[in-house]
Amino acid sequence: MRRPVYRPRRLRRSPHVRALAAEALLDPSHMILPVFLGDGIKKPEPIDTLPGHHRYPPESKELVDYIASAMDLGVKSFLLFAYSKVRDRIGSAAFSSGGPVQRAVRTIRRELGWEPVVFTDLCICSYTSHGHCGVPRELPDGRVVIDNDETLEVYAKIAVSQAEAGADFIAPSGMMDGQVAAIREALDEAGFTDVGIMAYSAKYASAFYGPFRGALDSAPRFGDRRSYQMDPRRAREALREVELDIQEGADIVMVKPALAYLDVIRLVKDAFPWVPLAAYNVSGEYVMVKLAGSNGVADYNTLMMEVLTAIRRAGADIIITYHALEAAKLIREGFNPF
Ligand code: PBG
């Protein structure tokens, strides 16, 4: 008698059989497209460090067209960042009603209404002279630290000004302790109880942010971000960060970066299955895939779909990705590399 062979290959025999057994699916409706705004520019400027992306003038037709074309492809959610020319110690331009983010949100609301889901990144690193995400303070002994609680006061003002402009969700990315509670309280006090918070909960001190910092000129001018962003050697601390953010009132939590932190995504999803989890497929991960595509390492489209699917499979509900439009187009065309 022949030895019985268990045959997993039966479920791999054709594209439709494979699709039937697939667990992780990709759809543009759960992707968020990062959108960059420039300050004092007349035309969209290509971002050298992020191929395929531009900085848009906040009140331009080009910005509106870009958002509208993404909506047509099924990408309905946007995360807004701005390059600011005006910079000071506390990043006060970030809470100006005439700031690039506030102007862009008002433009989107005026031209496209409330259908686009608008997330505004809340940080000061691209609005400060020093490039840190928090306000620096010099100690009597000469050391400079990032003052957590002074920063929270600035964050509260930014949150309210972004909500006033018409943001759906505020997305604090500075990794200050208590930032979600401070923002929730400020929003509620100002009457914005319906404005949500997507918290950058487990954000690691990562070298994968390089192209983004190039896009906004937001690299720290002294020191680094390791006193506030998480240590890449720690996974379980992410559970504490996420738990705190949920307790403080976050509606959506996030792990960032995504690709090098798939284990953290899985850990968080298993521990808190009921909270929507976003994963940020960051700039350096995007560029890495671009380079692999252009250097003949892999077929770009196939590699991109594999990366995005892996992030979903790890447990992310939402993916923030620079690939969103390319992926949406391919999905619409029926492209399926699996
Ligand atoms: C700002 C911020 C950063 C990113 C999102 N918000 C950069 C940083 O922390 O230095 C990175 C996003 C990316 O690399 O795509 N706090």
Image (tube, rainbow, N blue to C red):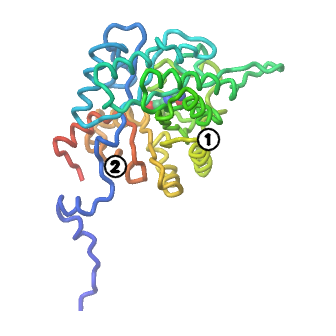
Q: What separation in Å lies between label 2 and label 1 (alpha carbons)?
A: 26 Å
Write down the residue under mark 1. Answer: 231
Q: Are marks 2 and 1 in contact (CB under 8 Å)?
A: no
Against 42, is 257 above or below?
Answer: below
Secondary structure under the numbered disc 1 in the rendered image: loop
Residue at horizontal 19 percent and vertical 45 percent from the top? 335
Residue 46, image x and y in percent?
33, 17
Write down the residue under mark 2. Answer: 309
> Which numbered marker is on residue 135?
none
Report which quarter residue 202 is drawn in.
top right
Between 150 and 227, the residue placed more toward the observer is 150
Crowding at dot 1, Cα within 10 Å, few <14 / some 14-19 / many 20+, comes out as: some
Between 282 and 233, the residue placed more toward the observer is 282
Residue at horizontal 38 percent and vertical 54 percent from the top? 313
Residue 308, image x and y in percent?
35, 45
Residue 271, image x and y in percent?
53, 56
The quarter in which the N terminus is drawn is: bottom left
* Residue at far front of view: 191
* Residue type indicated by callout 2: Thr
* Residue type indicated by callout 1: Asp
